Amino acid sequence: MTTDALTSTDLRSAIQTALDTFFDGHSEILEQASPDAGVLTDSLRTLVHGGKRLRPTFAYWGYRSTGNGHSDEIVRVATSLEFLQACALIHDDVMDGSDTRRGNPSVHRQFEALHTSSGWNGDGANFGLGAAILVGDLALSWADTMLCTSGLTDAQLQRAKSVYDTMRAELMAGQYLDLLEQSRGGTTIDQARNVIKYKSAKYTIERPLEMGAAIADAPTTVRTLLSTYGLAIGEAFQLRDDLLGVFGETHVTGKPAGDDLREGKQTILVALTQNLGTESTNELLKKHLGNPALDSATIAVLQDAIQETGAVDAIEQDIARLTETAINAISNENIDPIAGQALTELAISATQRSA
Amino acid sequence: MTTDALTSTDLRSAIQTALDTFFDGHSEILEQASPDAGVLTDSLRTLVHGGKRLRPTFAYWGYRSTGNGHSDEIVRVATSLEFLQACALIHDDVMDGSDTRRGNPSVHRQFEALHTSSGWNGDGANFGLGAAILVGDLALSWADTMLCTSGLTDAQLQRAKSVYDTMRAELMAGQYLDLLEQSRGGTTIDQARNVIKYKSAKYTIERPLEMGAAIADAPTTVRTLLSTYGLAIGEAFQLRDDLLGVFGETHVTGKPAGDDLREGKQTILVALTQNLGTESTNELLKKHLGNPALDSATIAVLQDAIQETGAVDAIEQDIARLTETAINAISNENIDPIAGQALTELAISATQRSA
């Protein structure tokens, strides 16, 4: 066992190398079917080049929480989660009709543009939709391929796979609940919290940590501490995301300011505003929420109205409380101190992104 | 080693039992996220209840080609391919905007209807699309979950997984090439044949057989024979499907008669008709192919025009030749006679479905 520390830059670089190696080894299957199919892997490769690497990072430190050292195998396993996330993003963008992702056109828009510039027959938007569904399917397939060929022992792989299977099914459930809440409208705080739990807390943080810990065959005490940390930071991370979706600047979020208001997202922030706000605040929300053509003046009015209810302060307090709970859990003698330090820094950076 | 014979009814029943057991064991993860998410598994369960079980059947007999007996493990592995196929069908129906599948509304239409009957906000078609993408993603995930938890030894699983990974990537490539051919129009016979090879021959027959043979650790001679059989029957099967898509009755195909003409599918039949036909035949095709509103009188005119070029006879000869090649390959002393017999019957039933 080594106890080497590792900067987040080192880890990001190792993740990128693992991705590059995987693409180099697997793109050929599609190229062989036809050179025309290479565009699927090109599109996926560009997409996974970006991203904050949250899920791989948590899986990695989950593994090291018991004192295990760095290894190429654990980096590969952890990196496989980037493909799962790529699938979620690509298919999410199709469902939401989003135009951009990580500073580029969304995958369906890229293929729509290819259709247009090639002068092909039929509806370009429909071609884009079809191709994006397939790139997402490829990403979902490759998540699993990368996980299973990462070089773990059979016993490690079986333990990892069991957590991964649960995580993947929960992701689909969480995505569906999100879709459902947007359609049903008038979400309650409890419903919004459940969507967060499945779509974000478990998927982004708790399960990746658990997967890493399962590979390390960590004892129950460690797993419980990681789970406490994961659920708390997962919720805090999503609450921060909700705030950024309404108040965040484009240069931080990569999306137009106030985008969640235009989308009419049923977040905890919205549910809390409805609970705390006056009748006129609720009228204002009802009138404008979900209007894709909202102008920046109206967005500013909505931002002020939300702020005045006290919902933002309440959520900031929640974020602070959840972060404290998480850091307390991880600052335990049963957690390897290097991993504990890394997870503490991650707790802070994931929840304190400035607007 | 046993050499028990097994009727196709027995095998279908074993596959259904394996599916039921899997659903009973795995639906809970989604129900736990929310009772609202149970509808995803209900929808998938209904879909996989139907179907011809082609891929599981070929995987099963691929395993038995070396003389291995029946086992529950091989049934479970083989059955996992039904989930892969379910993903392909659900996502295909979204891309094509198909209304029905296996005698029921397609998955996206089911969820659209749920949206409408529940009186939810927003666009019902968009809700249906989102939910269907997620049910397909769940199916793709469960294919892999079922494969990896089927009870194979680690070495068997690794061999199976390697074929499966290739097959899955080829499926995505094949689906994309299909989409591309429909958009580019004016397909050549070679291009249409390549789509068939990847979307159908490899995916439906060759790779499932190869997966079964890999689990059995079959020698190269056996694998080569199975591959010859698989590619030939796969192409013949798809050619039959092309004929049925133009000439098949609804009670055989489960689709409206002449559906491929309305969709404007770029099949080998269409490419061959264009090669063999007169200028006026080609004008006629150009005018009507891909018109979703084609009436039955025009379809009858198109059917006659296609028939008159001799394209149908040529394709019938191709099917007969390919079937003979396949049966010759499989009637070899290196192939277990019980498996050889079953594969011979499958070759005939898959390629001689009556119009």
Image: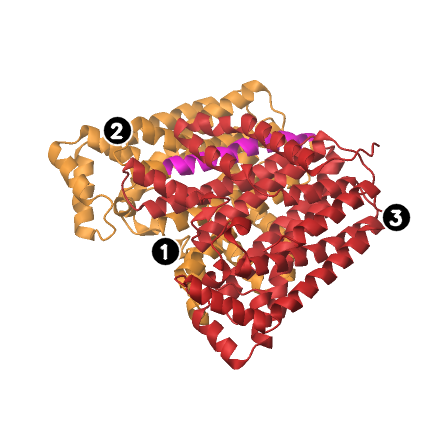
Chain colours: A orange, B red
Badge 2 sits on which subunit? A
Residue at the (32%, 36%) spot, across then down = A181
Tag 3 near tag 2, CB within 8 Å: no
Q: Which residue is mark 3?
A: B333
Distance CA(mark 2)–CA(mark 1)? 32 Å
Q: Which residue is mark 2?
A: A314
Locate residue A89 relative to residue A261 in the image: left or right: right
> Which element is circle 1 on?
loop
Q: Is residue A119 visible?
A: yes
Residue B272 falls in image quadrant = bottom right
> Which element is circle 2 on?
helix
> Which element is circle 3 on?
loop
Question: Hey, what amino acid is under mark 3?
Answer: Glu
Residue A99, numbered label: 1
Give, as a single range, the part of the protein colored magenta: A155-178
Tag nearer the camera, 2 or 1: 1
Question: Hey, what amino acid is under mark 2?
Answer: Ala
Q: Earlier in the sequence, mark 2 or mark 1?
A: 1
Frontmost residue, B174 versus A2: B174
Locate residue B211 relative to residue A343 in the image: left or right: right
Coordinates of residue A60 in the picture (x, y in percent): 56, 36
Q: Is residue A28 magenta?
A: no
